[in-house]
Image: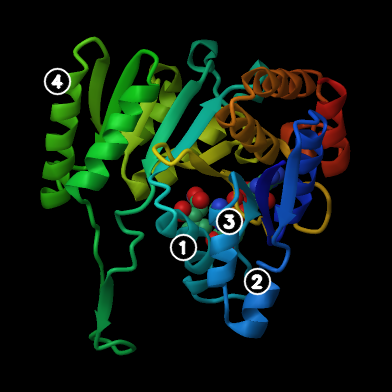
Amino acid sequence: MTRIAVIPGDGIGPEVVEQAVLTLDEFRLGLDFDFLDHVNADTYLRTDVALSDEDVARVASSRSALLGAIGDPRVGSPAYGRGVLLRLRFDLDLYVNYRPAKLLSDRLSPLRRDRARAVDCVVIRENTEGLYTGLGGSLRPGGGHEIALDIDLSTHRGTARVVDHAFSVARREVCMVDKANAVEHGGGLWQRCWRTAAARHPDMATRHMYVDAAAMRMVTDPTTFDVIVTNNSYGDILSDVASAVAGGIGTAASANLNPERGFGLYEPVHGSAPDIAGKQVANPIGAILSAGLLLADLGHTAEAAALRHAVARAVTEGETTPDLGGPLDTRKAGQAVRARL
Ligand code: NAD
Ligand code: IPM
Ligand code: MN
């Protein structure tokens, strides 16, 4: 049996993960799901523990992991989200956050010009450095003279490996996105790693854009992108924009990867959506397509392709949740995908 750790998490997390697991079960591939149901905001509020060392070991010893969402409006500090999601990304060294955005059906595009619609790109987001390390501090906290510092960390190793990974998955072009016109030290490092990698791949088309222009282009003509590689924060933001022009945040999938170790933590790009949680209206497609990325990485490529086709058909035929204009609840939207496998 192949053990998959499952963290349903908070809000709509359990609702969408249920549909992803049921969909994986359809393939009868001998996957054995190990549910870490206790990892959620209720437990954190009660015990002050976001994720125990034992939980981390359980996830690390699994073949792959699937996560719903982490986040709850009752938790004020970022310590909880950091303690689960960022801890897994950092402790397991999942340095690639692979976030594909592909238009599932023409009717989902918010863009008026049809030539701008056929989005099919991947944001490769650096996932273990940048503004997310927690390095920094507050001077004179609490008063009118407070100074808050959050260090934007880039290392040569961390930057070079994620840029190299972008070249290994690109089909026609790699676009590196930074803010080297304003951010001096990190910008320079990304530029140097970028030029070295580009020189090693003379057959791959390359492009560089500043993040403000890239965000603008992602809205006006997203079809020009193939693979975007960028740092942790810019990747967080650009992948949400890409999901919106590809049909909606509810459809976006992601994989947190360590390609050398062959381990992945798969999760929808969206969060716990407290505004719609508990109502069974959340779109399960982001979670289901994340499960599809998991299947592909386990080598079940035919099953992963079948899953993507089933999702695209369900969407084209209008068998979706209300966010995509359909009449179905979360469970029925999951069933609609499974019925088309
Ligand atoms: P969000 O993605 O949860 O929600 C943004 C908007 O998109 C909301 O209006 C929501 O209803 C809608 N939405 C999201 N997923 C949807 C789906 N599957 N179907 C239909 N509509 C959907 O972002 P937020 O509101 O900024 O964050 C809420 C909480 O989730 C916060 O605590 C945040 O830290 C956390 N979060 C967690 C993750 C994660 O676990 N990977 C990712 C993003 C945000
Ligand atoms: C994501 C989320 C997280 C991030 C938050 C919840 C810390 O927005 O997975 O995109 O910024 O990485
Ligand atoms: Mn995000």
Q: Is residue 299 above or below residue 136?
A: above
Query: Which residue is the site of mark 2?
Result: 41
Q: Between residue 8 and residue 32, name the one nearer to us.
A: 32
- Separation (CA) of disc 1 from disc 4: 34 Å
Would you say the beta carbon of the disc 2 residue lies within 8 angstroms of ligand 1?
A: no
Query: Which residue is the site of mark 3?
Result: 59
Of label 2 and label 1, which has the lower sequence position? 2
Query: Which residue is the site of mark 4?
Result: 199
Would you say the beta carbon of the disc 4 residue lies within 8 angstroms of ligand 2?
A: no
Q: Between residue 84 and residue 234, name the one nearer to us.
A: 84
Pick the quarter of the image with the C terminus.
top right
Q: Is residue 110 above or below residue 53?
A: above
- Separation (CA) of disc 3 from disc 4: 38 Å
- Separation (CA) of disc 2 from disc 4: 47 Å
Residue 87, numbered circle: 1
Q: Between residue 295 and residue 223, name the one nearer to us.
A: 295
| Left or right relative to 327: residue 290 | left
Badge 2 marks a residue whose secondary structure is: helix
Residues tagged 2 and 3 counted as in contact (Cβ below 8 A):
no
| Left or right relative to 190: residue 322 | right
* Callout 3 amino acid: Val
